[in-house]
Image (cartoon, helix red, strand yellow):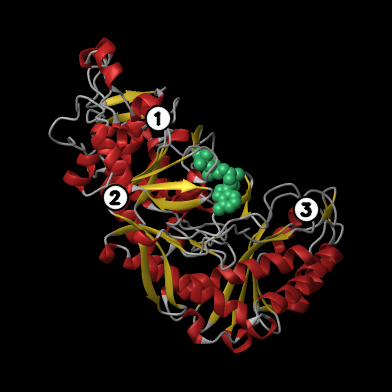
Amino acid sequence: MSDRNNLKSTLLRLDGASYKAYKDIKGNYQFPDFTLIIDHVQGDPFASPSKLRVKLPQSVAKFPHQLYQSCSREVALRDYLTRQFYRAATQISFRRGTGKSGLIAITRCGQEVLERTSVFIDDNYVEVRFVVGLPARGRSILGRQATEILCEDIPEIVEKALLYQSLNSKEIQQQVETIEDADWLRSQLVAKRLVAFVANGAILPRRSGVDSRPLEEEAIPFQSPASLKVKFDCPNRGLIEGMGIPEGITLIVGGGYHGKSTLLRAIELGVYNHIPDDGREFVVTNPAAMKIRAEDGRSIAGVNISPFINHLPQERSTTNFSTANASGSTSQAANIIEALEAGANLLLIDEDTAATNFMIRDRRMQLLISKEQEPITPFIDKVRQLYSDRGVSTILVMGGSGDYFDVADTVIAMENFQPKDVTERAKAIAQQYNTERTPEGGTNFGKITPRIPSPNSINPSRGKRAVKLKVRDVDEVAFGTEDIDLAAVEQIVETGQLRAIALAIVYAKEKYIDNKRTISEILDEIMNDISEKGLDIITDFPQGDLALFRRFELAAALNRLRTLKVR
Ligand code: ADP
Ligand code: MG
């Protein structure tokens, strides 16, 4: 194997040469403490940067085994090291020429701790995957600058970010213990018949709509009402108390601006773990929770929305409903049915983003517009059956209609950002003031019809490229010549998840979308492959910028592919 000096002399030799000559440096180099692997060299200074790896033996890195001994701890440590590498690389790297020249970068992590392909660790090695913008002036190689980056800066980053002795051992310990406790808490919910837990002291509000770090000064810590208080004895931190949200139907009510949506948002993201100072690190939710909202304009492919929508104008089928441009209510119906098809067992709905005519239909409207003239069976008439027929719970923010008091098991009022249990009072009011509505939901929820996607309707190619994917933030991915709009899929939190989802659809098309398997079977296969073999299974090439997603978001992306056809 070549060593650092070979790399140095090659780079100096290439100084001034045309950029393409950088291809010569692809390969492995033995540095004093680690191996540097150059997997992919960019074609020009503006192209996506070159892909590199560092493989550092544990004899040098020296991470104690206990820091990665459980699955939870391992994910937490890998996440932690990614953040450290990010920080060190940001401090050290600077622009050294044209385009991306001088960049040293790794996945940027948000508040969530996810399984990522940026860092791996086992008893033998720490492996880190990152990118470098190989430097040039115009299109001529800057060889000296390249040696500085590869032979000096990278060893410095490794020393700062990847050696146990250079890191804050207390902070690492806190990270792995927090994540392990959060995973443990989530695993305890079912036994206590809870769908979510919000710890006392949690800080739920965020700094702004575009900054998901915790609100600092004026934040009021969460405090459970006595009647909903539950306790857990966590493996690391010991006793923890907070509010348990029971299975069934839960309403979150309260005046405007009193913290209802903030609570629901924290619950939505409680399917993921959070870093220790996030404020929501002990807000945990059933992992099969799906945020549901209206999303007019989305496409729908052959969904049986008949539990909610029937006899549309022009006799359009609702048992096999397709459209390129859904309405608010049909999109919300499809979002629910698709979530159930993927296996969701907790629905989260906020009135702020729901279609009113899908949520409620009061007595007066029932009298004015007869059932024959109204295709929609409102959610209020199905929410009970969702739980009794299918075991699917719902948490609903609803400040605008008391009709839901009749169907709720638990009613939580947010008052000045604090929850109160008002279930009894809401039930008493419901007794005293009958809504006089006619129930419209029938005797059962209705059927979820499995769908079989057609492989020919899923085409990731564009021009000469067999696979062309491009992720734009967490909202959109270009899949071949199609754009998949995921702005309304609120539980995608990092671009790495979306990148992995797009690759997983390609992988699914190659392996499992065969005109026989249903969507739910395809999701099972993919998630199973990933949990057995890791995220690398969906790529041909070691890629450092992927993050683990849930089956629900994968299904959501497939369902929003406008060319999708199903049977
Ligand atoms: P609602 O849905 O009830 O209208 P929101 O949840 O949107 O209210 O919250 C309104 C505002 O109050 C937001 O700016 C939010 O960040 C802030 N907020 C929410 N919870 C808290 C809290 N616990 N402490 C301080 N501010 C909060
Ligand atoms: Mg709100």
10 Å neighbourhood of mark 2: few (<14), some, or many (≥20)?
many
Quadrant showing the N terminus: bottom right
Q: Position of residue 58 (x, y in %)?
A: 57, 85
Q: Using the numbered discs, state the Cα–Cα distance from disc 2 to disc 3 in whole angstroms.
A: 54 Å
Question: Which residue is most to the front?
Answer: 432
Q: Using the numbered discs, state the Cα–Cα distance from disc 1 to disc 3 in whole angstroms.
A: 39 Å
Position above or below: 193 against 489:
below
Residue pictured at 38% horizontal, 46% vertical:
290
Position above or below: 261 against 59:
above
Q: Position of residue 96 (x, y in %)?
A: 85, 57
* Type of the residue with mark 3: Tyr
Quadrant showing the C terminus: top left
Q: Name the residue under label 3.
A: 19
Q: Which of marks 2 and 1 is nearer the N terminus?
A: 2
Does any portion of residue 76 appear in the rendered image?
A: yes
Q: Name the residue under label 2.
A: 345
Q: Using the image as rendered, state which of residue 527 and residue 11 is in the foreground.
A: 527
Q: Using the image as rendered, state which of residue 562 and residue 369 is in the foreground.
A: 369
Does any portion of residue 369 appear in the rendered image?
A: no
Q: Mark 1 points at which residue?
A: 563
Q: How many marks?
A: 3
Q: Which mark is residue 422?
A: none
Q: In this view, does 1 lie to the left or right of 534?
A: right
Q: Using the numbered discs, state the Cα–Cα distance from disc 2 to disc 1 in whole angstroms.
A: 28 Å
Q: Which of marks 1 and 3 is nearer the N terminus?
A: 3
* Type of the residue with mark 1: Thr
Q: Judging from the image, what secondary structure is the residue with disc 2 in?
A: loop
